[in-house]
Image (tube, rainbow, N blue to C red):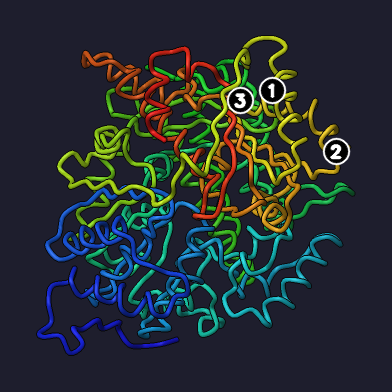
Amino acid sequence: MNTHSLEIRDSGRGHESGLASRSERFLRDVVAEALEDYEPRQPQIDMLRSCAGTIEKGGVLLAEAGTGTGKTFAYLVPLLAAGERAIISTRTINLQEQIVSKDLRFLAGLNPFDYAIAKGRSNYLCLRRLNSFRPSDERENEECAELLRWASKTETGDIEDYGSRRVLVWDRVCSDADACKSNQCAFYSSCCYFGARGRWNKAQIIVANHALVGINAMLDPDARLLPQTNLLVIDEAHALDNVLSDVAGLTLSNRGFDMIMNRLLRLDEKGTYRGLLSQTPDLFQAVELLKTEMGLFWVRVKNTVKHRETIKGTFELKSQLMGLAEAIGGLVEEMVSCTTGLFHEDEELEIKASIIKLKAFAEGMVGFTDCRDGATGFVRWAETEEKRIALRMSPVYPRDFMMSHIMPGYRSVILTSATLSVAGDFSFMTRVLGLEGAETLSVPSPFDFKKQIEVHIKRGINLRQPGSAEKLAAVIIEEASRGDGGMLVLFTSRESMRAAWAIAGAALREMGLNPMVQGEMPNRLMLEIMRESENSVIFGLDSFWEGVDVKGDSLKCLIMAKLPFEVPTEPIVKARTEEIELEGGNAFYEYSLPRAVLKFRQGFGRLIRSKSDSGRVIICDDRIETMAYGRTFLGSI
């Protein structure tokens, strides 16, 4: 790892000038010379100058940069030239790793400086937990043996480096703050997590993610995970709203509770008790009783509240929920009295970690019942799927969290994305995030979309009507029959995707293509297959509308099954639109339409990733032509 800060000076052309001038010269003279086929473009220079200004004088900048602008260099070069430590935050792992392995590595080769990637704690292996892990069956024994082999050679302990194999025991061997001995641990000197923290503290540039930045901001200053900095760049800022809402919100689920309880006590296939409390029979009855009561509660939730239905006023099952919170407290007291001093140190640590998690679950129950919809700026709802039941609570807008937790920690904040405005109007994004006074900049893409993209609109497909799946499948098959490269089909609902897949999947396979549908394999693997072929067809949902970077003939056709309006009855959407209407505004034009246009632009941007790319976009929703608001979509591309 290199240890010098990047110094960009006025080489032989007079005294050192302002940050913008120095950064621009470095981009034009050094980067352009070192990078083959690279030529600084005016949109990139404009963004670089604005970023440099914000870094120098402080404040907030929303910088929208069209696809191909080179926005990463536009903020990285002035950050490095400033010589201060900075945090860069992304939504996706793909961009996080691209910035580290490609952009920062290249720049560090020109002028050495330290940089590091920062991920949430559970991404890192805990050597103490792994070495004290006791497998309960052959599968766990095999996983443990493989992890031990990996641990002996991994430099990071990052699960991402382990490969695409799923590790079922990972939650029991990953780093966990509740089960950590910190510098009192025998493995501290070789700890994967604290080793990563050490690299963060040495680095000038730390590349984190939105969730980690949000969680870090919630901690007391002396307990924060990320180093103190004055500079924050939020890339993929279009996604910050949803991530911060999750971070500031609450989720109580049957799966989450069962994971804690099964760690304590569970029956194996032979009817033998396994788990941390398997040698404490005095607790068997209390644990099993609480499991049963919680199981019945989740059934009541499913029978009482509809899936994703907003919960207003007093929660109908409040008394049962409060009773269960008390029951959890009772079990915790019994566990403390029955286990303290009777277990080996490693087992006692794991039991204490489970106690902390049970207490947090009970506190969440109380918080959920205490919250009354609207009065606190939060919205509550239930999710009742076949195997997963959850109670959710989230802020209606994350702007209060943004202004009270994120913004005070930094002198300069730059938010950037290819999609932050609707026709140059940033008001939607600034209102959602509470950044009404921020400076804004929008620079165009250098790509010639009119020459590089053909846009076709298919009429007569309404996915809410019978027979629409057949019509959509026919379009997919027809486009695939052209055989000129890969295809990405974007959906807004799982039901519609599955219906089209059921009809078109086999037909595409018979044509010699390689169709894949989200959910049957990891998204990342699907994209790797697409990049290395020219006959892949991906059926994808929300996560494929953004973050997909596939060049050339590997992606020649993009099909949008429907304009990406959010479902109006979704709890957060409903709460936001109701608030706008109560204030006398027009919820459709102030919220629903701009939200859909930003999503549309994200999806549209998946097709053209370089000047040499070309292809076609098929829009299977004729509202883009027949409705007046359709012009807003067409005018955004």
Residue that badge 2 annotates: 511
- Asked if marks 3 and 2 touch (Cβ < 8 Å), the reply is no
- Type of amino acid under label 1: Leu
Give the label on residue 472, or none.
1
Residue 63, how many percent across, how many down? Answer: 28, 50
Residue 198, how many percent across, how many down? Answer: 42, 79
Please give the name of the residue rendered at 73% of the width and 47% of the height, measured from the top-left corner.
521
Pointer 3 or 2: first along the chain: 3
Q: Secondary structure at mark 3?
A: strand
Q: Looking at the image, can residue 297 be seen?
A: no
Q: Secondary structure at mark 1?
A: helix
Above or below: residue 287 compared with residue 211: above
Question: Residue at the front extreme?
Answer: 451
Q: Which marked residue is nearer to the observer: mark 2 or mark 1?
A: 2
- Type of amino acid under label 2: Met
Above or below: residue 483 compared with residue 49: above
Please give the name of the residue rendered at 18% of the width and 71% of the height, measured from the top-left corner.
21
Residue that badge 3 annotates: 384
Of residue 202 and residue 7, the one placed in the foreground of this image is 7
How busy is the neighbourhood of tag 1: few (under 14 within 10 Å), some, or many (20 plus)? many
Q: Is residue 295 left or right of residue 353?
A: right
Residue 478 is drawn in which quadrant?
A: top right
Q: Looking at the image, can residue 251 be seen?
A: yes
Pointer 1 or 3: first along the chain: 3
Task: Estimate the spatial distance between the alpha carbons at disc 3 and disc 2, rounded to whole Å.
Answer: 39 Å
- Type of amino acid under label 3: Thr
